[in-house]
Amino acid sequence: MSGNIVSLGGLTIGSKAALEKAMASEGCATTGATGCGSKQAPDDMDPATWAKVKDHPCYSEEAHHYFARMHVAVAPACNIQCNYCNRKYDCANESRPGVVSERLTPAEAARKVIAVANEVPQLSVLGIAGPGDSCADWKKTKETFSRVTQDIPDMRLCLSSNGLALPEHVEELVDMNVDHVTITINMIDPEVGAKIYPWIRHGGKRYYGVEASQILHERQMLALDMLVARGILVKVNSVLIPGINDEHLLAVNKEVKRRGAFLHNIMPLISDPAHGTHFGLTGQRGPTAAELQKVQEACSGGANLMKHCRQCRADAVGLLGEDRGQEFSLDKLPEALEYDPAGRESYKDWVAKEREDRRAAAADAKAETGATVAETAPKLLVAVATQGGGRINQHFGHASEFQVFEVDTTGVRFAFHRRCDNYCVDGAGEEGRLDRVIATLEGIDTVLCAKIGDCPRETLAEAGITVLQDYAYDYIETAVSAVYRARMGLAPAQAETA
């Protein structure tokens, strides 16, 4: 087991003192931006693209282990109506796009970003994702970005849009150095779109049905083409709606790949009558995990798929899979704030070192597995409880989600995540939670965590799920590889050094 493990949980509170202590334990300097480790790009990515995505948790699966995002809710206006959206709803126990606890002015948003950046050194990206549409409320979006970059010039800027008004602002995005844009594209056939969008508002006029979807489709394709032509990375979000666009999303995937989209994120519809959406109130169900996986597998070979999305709130703060937004409500922020860059700069250096070590460990594990396991050996899915950093560093009982990795003779890969809080649990307490976790882990028989109590471990064993804590704080790839070799009968089931 590795020594001097840095807990990411310890880096997120009181950034300067905690960070200095953490860096000292790793032997890293805390005053410069160049002291610890290589920033070399992965072998399968060109350096220019790596420079854009290496710190962006949504555009890089590797980055999401290390870096945090922040959304500021400055754009409440919207120019389309989606049958899966209700921007007025808020629940403290829920995570869902469009949901916010408080709307901000650009000045308030800039103050909040400084507060978060000083306390959360993992913060690398500022995004505007509503709660309406960032381009429909363009003046607020632009002013927010301008205010933030005056104080924190290295903050990556990112926005999400339905694409309708996006073409009008592409040149301004280029001027502001926004190099990541997400467009929600649920269809390329207006007949399908008419089942998703009741109306749009464009050019001072409201359109309905197929005509509305035709205009929206044309504007989305124009926006995608314009962004790609200017070197801006585009992630396409698509909401999977069973019986409406599930089969159609294969065509969407092929089309956005043809037009140069960097990633395609196929997300499950979140549908519950309590949310007050049209789909929720009319009984439209969301997809099962198996249905989502089937569509993603059908898109294999098309546009690269994002599988680590958490469908964040429009005011989310923190690593993907966590939301610390309630810690930074306006009433908790000092009136006077000054940005201190030391914490974030030192954290980047620590990440560079961790990445280099983790990549070397993963390469060694891959080489050993490939050399010792027959080509006919089956794949294995392993669920991991992690707080980030690419390590197995979370107590089983504290996990609200599990990251699932696929391993075979070619190596270890992130496959998908499984949430066990399911967005909103109607105020339910701990009773019955283990049943929800067992249901969440359907199809997975091995879980790795930092620690687990005897009672839940025995209950999980009765359900056919083996939970191992022998690999606590090891790198995920090396631990999963060791479990795989042990399962194939080719190595002892013991922890390996990371």
Image: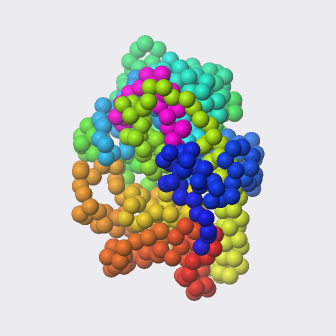
Q: Judge whether residue 445 can be spotted in this image.
A: no
Front-most of residues 417 and 228 = 417
Front-most of residues 475 and 118 = 118
Front-most of residues 152 and 476 = 152
Q: Residue 32 vs residue 112: left or right?
A: right
How many circles with numbers are drawn on the protein?
Answer: 0
Report the residue at 67% width, 40% height from top.
52
Query: x%, y% of residue 449?
Result: 47, 68
What segment carries the magenta color? 98-120
Q: Residue furthest top?
A: 204
- Res 461 quadrant in image: bottom left
Query: x%, y% of residue 92?
Result: 31, 43
Report the residue at 71% width, 79% height from top.
371
Residue 360 drawn above or below residue 96: below
Does 118 appear in magenta?
Answer: yes
Q: Judge whether residue 155 can be spotted in this image.
A: yes
Report the residue at 46% width, 41% height from top.
317
Query: x%, y% of residue 55?
Result: 63, 45
- The rendered magenta stretch, by its main secondary structure, is classed as helix
Residue 459 drawn above or below residue 428: below
Q: Residue 215 vs residue 371: left or right?
A: left
Query: x%, y% of residue 248?
Result: 47, 45
Quadrant position of the N terminus in the picture: bottom right
Residue 136 drawn above or below residue 228: above
